[in-house]
């Protein structure tokens, strides 16, 4: 992977860039130009969020079923 700064990636119209440095969680992966977040951290956060939302929806549906 070629190393770019975020500003260079934005100027080139790239969606992601690679700094060659680890994120605060130690991942050596690309980052998004839109917010600078590590792609791996974003994927992990999304997975946790989806599981949380799935549980909330399940609980809400169960509560509605009790009322009926």
Image (tube, helix red, strand yellow):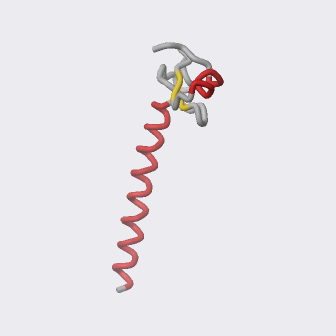
Which percent across, then down, holds residue 30? 49, 24
Number of marks in the rendered image: 0
Look at 40% across and 65% down and name the residue there.
Answer: 57
User: Against 8, is 61 above or below?
Assistant: below
**Image quadrant for the N terminus?**
top left
Residue reaching furthest to the front: 12
Residue 51 to residue 2: above or below: below
Instruction: Tell me the quarter of the image containing the C terminus.
Output: bottom left
The structure residue drawn at horizontal position 54% and vertical position 14%, both measured from the top left corner, is: 3
Towards the viewer: 68 or 3:
3
**36 up-or-down from 45: above or below:** above
Question: Where does the image place residue 4, in percent across and percent down from the top left?
Answer: 57, 17
**In the rendered image of this protein, does residue 57 appear above or below residue 67?**
above
Residue sitting at x 36%, y 65%: 58
Q: Residue at x 44, y 37 (%)?
A: 43
- Residue 33, horizontal then vertical, whole percent: 58, 31
The location of residue 61, given as percent across then percent down, is 37, 72
Relative depth, front residue between 25 and 17: 17
Most extreme residue toward the right, as rendered? Answer: 7
Image-based side of 17 in relation to 6, left or right? left
């Amino acid at each position: 992977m070629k190393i770019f700064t975020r500003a260079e990636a934005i100027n080139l119209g790239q969606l992601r860039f690679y700094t060659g440095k680890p994120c605060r969680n130690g991942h050596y992966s690309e980052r998004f130009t839109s917010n600078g977040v590590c792609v791996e951290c974003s994927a992990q956060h999304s997975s946790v969020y989806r599981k949380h939302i799935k549980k909330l929806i399940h609980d809400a549906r169960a509560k509605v079923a009790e009322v009926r």
